[in-house]
Image: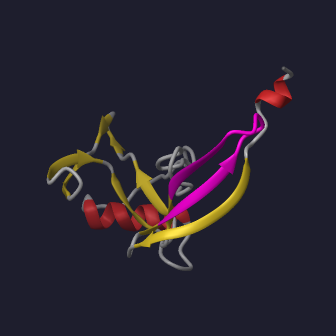
Amino acid sequence: MTMSKSLQKPTILNVETVARSRLFNVESVDLEFSNGVRRVYERMRPSTREAVMIVPIVDDHIILIREYAVGTESYELGFSKGLIDPGETVDEAANRELKEEVGYGANKLTFLKKLSMAPPTSPAK
């Protein structure tokens, strides 16, 4: 088997939206792999805008926020994050979220990486 054959993407035979919410849609995706095997997977598609996550560092200390996480039904520590408003740049959104959640803005912002939130199930970034 050649390297290109082993990396061949499956063929998408059908995509159907099976559920909708305020934040995302769930799609059923019917795939056929190069060996002829067919499988149906589900994936989440964001129904809103892209988001930012900020890793604030002050005097070599990382600043975390405590916020209620409905998924775990508890307060969790994490980084500031939020949706990018229409017409807003990534830097503007990051600074706005810092001000809202931490209480002050950044003197300098450094873009680190664009990430997928949950690569196996979601193309959201």
Residue, x 58% and y 68% (percent of image)?
16
Q: Is residue 7 above or below residue 13?
A: above
User: Which quarter shows the N terminus?
Assistant: top right
Q: Is residue 74 above or below residue 88?
A: above
**Picture quadrant where residue 98 is located:** bottom left
Q: Residue 31 or 8: which is nearer the viewer?
A: 31
Residue, x 31% and y 39% (percent of image)?
62
Name the colouring of the figure. Answer: secondary structure
Q: Position of residue 51 (x, y in %)?
A: 47, 62
Q: Is residue 53 above or below residue 87?
A: above
Q: Position of residue 39 (x, y in %)?
A: 60, 46
Q: Residue 15 or 84: which is nearer the viewer?
A: 15
Q: Residue 99 or 38: which is nearer the viewer?
A: 38
Q: Is residue 94 left or right of residue 124?
A: left
Magenta range is 26-43
Q: Position of residue 81 (x, y in %)?
A: 37, 58
Residue, x 71% and y 58% (percent of image)?
13
Residue, x 83% and y 24% (percent of image)?
3
Extreme-bottom residue of the structure: 86
Main SS category, magenta section = strand
